[in-house]
Amino acid sequence: MANMSLKRAALINAASKYTSILFSIGFSMALARILSPEDYGIVAVTTVFTNFFSIFADLGISAGIIQNKKLTVEDNASIFSLTLAFGLFLGLLFCAFSFFIADFYRNDVYVPIGFLLGLTLFGSTLNIVPEALLLKDKRFVMLAKRNVIIPFLTSLMTIGLAFCGWKYYALVMQSILSIWITFVVNLYTTHKDYGLYLYPGLTGRGICKILGYSFYQFLFGFINYFARNLDNLLIGRVWGEAALGYYDKAYRLMCYPNNSLTNVIAPVLQPILSDYQDNKRYIYEKYIRLLKFFSLVGVFLSIYCYFSAADIIAFLFGPQWAPAVPYFEMLALAVWAQLQLTSTGSIFQSAGSTKQLFWAGVINTTITAIAIVLAVLYGGVLELSRNVMIAFNV
């Protein structure tokens, strides 16, 4: 796998990604007819906060492991031990933080949901080192199989729970099951193939070797979080869970083209291109070819989604989601920009330029935050959707 080409890696990832997307669309269509916008809004609120805690869970460690080609088995084991201790701490901290969420949104349901999602945070932190090792070794075939089978099984379970009246808990359980089944598979594979184990005691043996690279990666993730989640935070607080449910559904629908195109290629860019981190010209030439393709496809998709917004939402989710149509129309005009933006992080990482990635994130986040706050102060959810679209394009 060491000499796998970018094209072959992308094709393997595309096969699993498109299969997963088809399953996801089918399951989303079913769940949207079982669960209410309020159910989705409640989960969207908690997702905003789990995403924030996940930034601290990763700390740029995953990208650092992939980029550094000199880490030993002992280094990996040392980092793995640190993630276990830190993941346990983060999980417990999120359980305590759930009381603040319940108070902020004036809804006690966030407390038991927060306790359950604490398990998700713990599991996702444990996954960092095994997942990074598999990507570093370019185990794309194994990852592709895993990324199809596990979501399929957990989605079936989620639909069953939704039918049984679990409401938003069904969506929460899907997250928990996905994370922990993935961890078991990853740990078994990396222990068997790479000898990954828990290093006795907590040391800085491995983490020190990737700290300089990972620090700016973490800072970028921290800054980028606010650009991606400030809208959800404020909508849920100002206009309530139902409004957030409609907006979140429109936003996720806007991300489908991005998930089915750039997210097919972006995950394999760093593992492949990091081998050429001293050859910036090679990285540049590969990236420009990708941008040309994404630009052409993105313009078409933006126009199509804008004019077909009502039909797309009615077909996928049913007439009860009609209030999401004007939000999706606005956000659809950002599909082109989304396709251009998503792969940039992998290029900065591959070139070892995480400091430049951080400063680019600062600029982007500032523009997006100003646009969102202005909409909250002087408009409604529709104006916010419009401002987010403008910010993405700027």
Image (cartoon, rainbow, N blue to C red):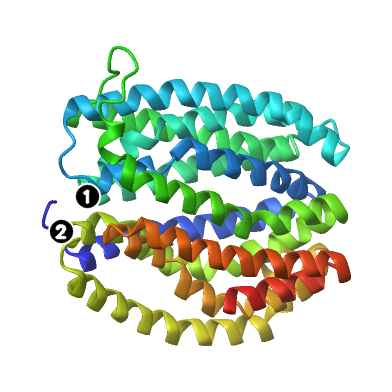
Q: Is residue 290 left or right of residue 280?
A: right
**Quarter of the rendering containing residue 58:** top left
Q: Residue at x 22, y 57 (%)?
A: 274
Image x and y of residue 203, in percent: 31, 20
Element type at mark 2: loop
Image x and y of residue 4, in percent: 15, 59
Q: Residue at x 25, y 37 (%)?
A: 209
Q: Residues within 10 Å of mark 1 (few under 14, many from 20)?
A: many
**Quarter of the rendering containing residue 190:** top left
Please, which residue is most extreme toward the left here?
Answer: 3
Q: Residue at x 56, y 42 (%)?
A: 156
Instruction: State the mark number for residue 187.
Output: none
Does the rendering let one see residue 142? no
Front-most of residues 97 and 214: 214
Image x and y of residue 331, in percent: 67, 74
Instruction: State the mark number for residue 138.
Output: 1
Element type at mark 1: loop
Q: Looking at the picture, which amino acid does disc 1 mark?
A: Lys
Circles 2 and 1 in contact, beta carbons < 8 Å: yes
Sequence order check, earlier mark of 2 and 1 = 2
Front-most of residues 13 and 22: 13
State the residue position of label 2. 4
Q: 338 above or below 301?
A: above
